């Protein structure tokens, strides 16, 4: 009887350790808060962030990430500029390394003063995004608090890459390109 209790205790402990490893080192669940990523993500949707893959793969243009925004807040935004890129926005059109990019995921809106910037106007020294820094924008540009306000995001603050939306079930997807 004592052996059986010990076996159950060990099994329970192993299960808890596995759950903790998965939760803290591999994957995490986040709840979308607000409308800054509409129409891609909506308020209260649930996503899974892959922390493991982020540590071993480079981020690409248009990847969706979650990063630590300070004050125990995490933001979800789209990577627009990578280290070494030149970025500017004119009349709502983003230019990466001199070329206009196609952004089918951006929610339609009326352009505003925020839609004209260069790296210099964002406070970056030089004309290229520095190493280990990223420019991020929300898909709902009219309301998004993103690099236009908070500046570039440090690689150290990136929690991981959004891998899938699982809630609501009717919106389950791993493709955030449109």
Image: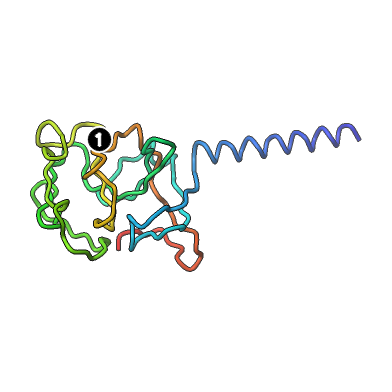
Check the picture and name the quadrant holding the C terminus: bottom left
State left or right for residue 96 relative to residue 165. Answer: left
Q: Residue furthest front?
A: 113
Q: Position of residue 171 (x, y in %)?
A: 45, 65
Residue 143 vs residue 27, the one in the foreground: 143
Residue 62, given in percent of the width and then of the height, sits at 27, 52
Helix, strand or loop for disc 1 = strand
Residue at 21% across, 37% down = 83
Which image quadrant: the N terminus? Answer: top right
Along the line of sight, which residue is nearer the eye, 177 or 46?
A: 46
**Residue drawn at x 9%, y 36% as measured from the top left:** 127
State how many labels appear. Answer: 1
Report which quarter residue 139 is drawn in: bottom left
What residue is drawn where x is 14% and y is 53%? 113
- Residue 95 at x, y percent in the picture: 12, 51
Mark 1 crowd level (few <14, some 14–19, many ≥20, 10 Å Cα): some
Q: Which residue is mark 1?
A: 133
Seen in the image, is 93 located left or right of residue 133?
A: left
Q: Could you tell me residue 19's position as x and y percent?
A: 60, 40
Image height of 138 relative to 4, above or below: below
Farthest bottom residue in view: 170
Image-quadrant location for residue 111: bottom left
Q: Nearer the viewer, residue 96 or 139?
A: 139
Residue 39 shown left or right of residue 47 in the figure:
left
Residue at 17% in and 36% down = 129
């Amino acid at each position: 009887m004592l052996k059986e209790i010990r076996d159950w205790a060990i099994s329970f402990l192993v299960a808890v350790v596995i759950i903790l490893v998965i939760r803290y080192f591999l994957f995490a669940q986040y709840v979308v808060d607000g409308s800054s990523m509409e129409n891609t993500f909506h308020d209260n949707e649930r996503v899974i962030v892959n922390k493991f893959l982020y540590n071993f793969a480079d981020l690409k243009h248009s990847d969706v990430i979650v990063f630590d925004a300070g004050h125990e807040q995490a933001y979800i935004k789209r990577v627009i500029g990578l280290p070494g890129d030149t970025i500017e926005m004119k009349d709502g059109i983003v230019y990466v390394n001199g070329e206009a990019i196609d952004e089918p995921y951006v929610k339609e809106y009326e352009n505003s003063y925020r839609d004209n910037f260069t790296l210099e106007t964002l406070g970056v020294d030089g004309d290229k995004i520095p190493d280990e820094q990223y420019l991020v924008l929300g898909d709902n540009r009219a309301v998004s608090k993103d690099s236009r306000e908070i500046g570039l995001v440090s690689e150290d603050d990136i929690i991981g890459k959004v891998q899938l939306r699982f809630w609501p079930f009717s919106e389950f997807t791993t493709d955030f390109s449109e």
